[in-house]
Image (tube, helix red, strand yellow):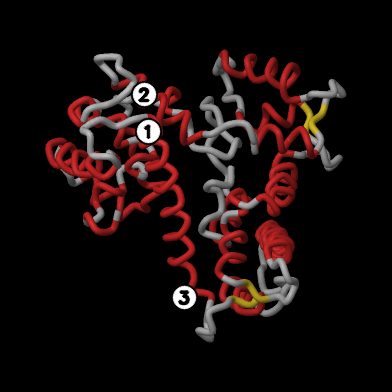
Amino acid sequence: MMMRWRSLLGLLALCASVAFCKPTSEKKERVHHSKDLDERDPEDQNGFQFDHEAFMGRDGAKTFDQLTPEESKERLGKIVDRIDHDQDGLVTADELTAWIKRAQNRYIDDNVKKHWNEYDVNRDGEISWEEYRNATYGFHVDEAFSDVSNDEDKASYRKMLRRDVRRFEKADKDGNKVATREEFTAFLHPEEFDYMKPIVVLETIEDIDKDGDGMVDEKEYVGDMYTPEEGEPEPDWVKNEQEQFRQFRDLNKDGKMDMKEVERWILPGDYDHAMAEAKHLIHESDKDEDSKLTKQEIVNNWNMFVGSQVTNYGEDLTRKHDEL
């Protein structure tokens, strides 16, 4: 979904609109948190590679992949020293949760900083709609994209522009068509701001709703996660998701999810993912079962930590100490 979802703005939005992916039996996640660690195989290096490239870019992932296991463990150990806030030699769930949230915030800040100079053309410390539009779509003659010959691409660009206009206007609290840094952050990462939640929900429905009724039925819900391959048996989790839809997603039992039901699904307010991930990491690594982790326990399970938000999916192992 969007945690990713469009942090590269126009490029990712276009990819989401027009890219045709190979059908897969793997489950697609739309809830706004990272994939739970218990859905990952700690020995699955292909899964780690996907995480690294998604969060670091190919160049960053390559840098990480050049580290030997010994180097990764050494650097992870230095990060553990930072996580252990009270320096008692033990990492608690609270300390791990605080670090994960810090890593999440740093990722957002870095992402905004990365794009700021690209769009703040006149260097006035703000980004106007015109600056963003011209930087993103300026190579086209007009907003009708009449210079795009392929009709399907033209429709995708128009859809992307409509979404950007709507999202920018929502992020722009004072309606002056100029985004402050906070407003631009809300534009890039709407899932992080309460007042942007309606946009996140609406964009999700638009992505999934195939019959145009403004709601998500069971077929659309499952179809967003799974495209069957010819000759391949339907995976068991599909039936589980169908049951999830009937019992827990479609709360009023009318066969469809409306705006409120979709929001409850993708933006669960009662779920602290950072705490859940911290507790899972402790559960998987706590050999003496004291509900805390020593540095050695963490290093011994380094593969799992490298594939988690604790290290920003391995990226922090490539950072200098003062960048953490």
CB atoms of marks 3 and 2 within 8 Å: no
Judging by the rendered image, the residue that carries numbered circle 1 is 47
Marks 3 and 2 sit apart, C-alpha to C-alpha, by: 39 Å
Q: Nearer the viewer, residue 294 or 317?
A: 294
* Amino acid type, mark 3: Asn
Above or below residue 252? Residue 168 is below
- Report helix, strand or loop for mark 2: loop
The percent position of residue 76, horizontal first and vertical second, equals 22, 40
Judging by the rendered image, the residue that carries numbered circle 3 is 117
Above or below residue 128? Residue 158 is above
The percent position of residue 140, horizontal first and vertical second, equals 64, 76
- Report helix, strand or loop for mark 3: helix
Marks 1 and 3 sit apart, C-alpha to C-alpha, by: 33 Å
Above or below residue 64? Residue 90 is above
Circle nearer the N terminus (3, 2): 2
Residue extending farthest to the left is: 70
CB atoms of marks 1 and 2 within 8 Å: yes
Q: Residue 179 occupies which quadrant of the picture?
A: bottom right
| Label 3 Cα neighbours within 10 Å, binned few <14 / some 14-19 / many ≥20 | some
Task: Check residue 315 in the rendering and tell me which mark sits there, or answer none.
Answer: none
Residue that appears at 72% across and 52% down: 199
Circle nearer the N terminus (1, 3): 1
Marks 1 and 2 sit apart, C-alpha to C-alpha, by: 8 Å
The residue mark sitting in front, 3 or 2, is 3
The residue mark sitting in front, 1 or 3, is 3
The percent position of residue 227, horizontal first and vertical second, equals 61, 29
* Amino acid type, mark 2: Asp
Judging by the rendered image, the residue that carries numbered circle 2 is 41
* Amino acid type, mark 1: Gly
